[in-house]
Image (spheres, grey):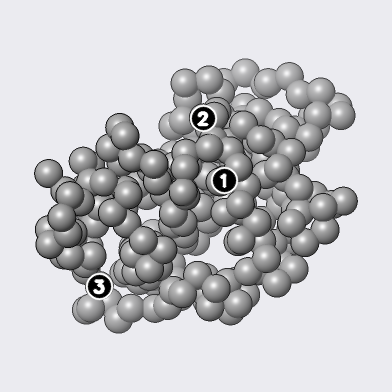
Amino acid sequence: MSVCGIGETTLVGLVCGIGEIGEILIDGNNLRRAAFQLDCVMGRVHDAQCVMSFHVPRIEFQIYLLLAAHVAAEVVRALDFIELACGGAFARLFPVGLTDRGGEFSDAEGIERSAADPGRRRCSIYYCDPMASHQKGSCEKNHVEFRKVVPKGTSMDALTADDMATITSHVNSYPRPSLGGMAPIDLALAILPRSLFEELGIGRVEPGEVVMTPRLLGLDRRGGATG
């Protein structure tokens, strides 16, 4: 993949290289790793709601937040929530983000602007090449985990914020061979602010109690959610 041109004063860069250990971004003469990746998971065609995924590749930790609409303002609102929940640590923990060119991610200034201090930047956001969402492959791969609980064809309008907390807790609580047998939430609890977990309403689930099927949310019993 060739190096992408980035203006010296442009706040938003472009992805132009992927390393074996994670997505590596080339910004001028600097190499930067994406600390988080963003994507949206859609439901049915006429659904108002959708789900934003905030993925932390290094520890395979995933946050799911429900968006009231598939629009840029809702993405910024969700990131504001995560930033404030981090209690001032967001810029240190998540200085660089990576996403695709979907319209919901088009407000680069809003994504980068701090909610706690609007005169400062909370992060720098980079975009995949056109039609190349695979460049944020670890985020895309984690959609498989979400779909185990919320299959394609499920109405996102039937989901709630509590559902997001439940899915987030379970998806992150089973051990991964790639993490040396640890679960993502074990690593997240060690390095991320406890306030983030409290605000999201998520916590560790014992491995033997993790449920990765639609039974977790009882979607089969909700009118209009599936089918």
Say which residue appears at 41% left-offset and 63% top-offset. Answer: 161
How far apart are the two marked residues, 3 and 1, measured between alpha carbons?
29 Å
Q: Quadrant of residue 168?
A: bottom left
Residue under label 2: 102
How busy is the neighbourhood of tag 3: few (under 14 within 10 Å), some, or many (20 plus)? some
Instruction: Determine whether the residue tagged by mark 1 lies in a helix, strand or loop.
Output: helix
Q: Can residue 57 be seen in this view?
A: no
**Structural distance between the alpha carbons of marks 2 and 1:** 11 Å
Q: Badge 2 local density, few (<14 within 10 Å), some, or many (20+)?
A: some
Percent from the top left, x then y, of residue 155? 26, 46
Residue 98 - label:
none
Report x, y in % for residue 41: 38, 43
Identify which amino acid the numbered label 2 is placed on.
Gly
Q: Which of marks 3 and 1 is in front?
A: 1
Residue 57 x %, y % = 51, 53
The reply to whether discs 2 and 1 touch (Cβ–Cβ < 8 Å) is no
Q: On the picture, is 115 further left or further right than 99?
A: right
Q: Which residue is at the front of the view, 110 or 62?
A: 110
Choose mark 2 or mark 1, whichever is in front.
Answer: 1
The reply to whether residue 121 is in sight is yes
Disc 1 crowd, CA 10 A, few/some/many (<14, 14-19, 20+): many
- Amino acid type of disc 1? Val
At x 81% / y 23%, what residue is drawn? 7
- Residue holding disc 3: 210
- The amino acid on which the numbered mark 3 sits, given as a three-letter code, is Val
Mark 2 lies on a secondary structure that is loop
Local secondary structure at mark 3: loop
**In the rendering, at what x and y percent does residue 192 appear?**
60, 71
Q: In this view, does 115 lie to the left or right of 45?
A: right
Q: Which of marks 2 and 1 is nearer the N terminus?
A: 1
Pick whichever of labels 3 and 1 is earlier in the sequence: 1
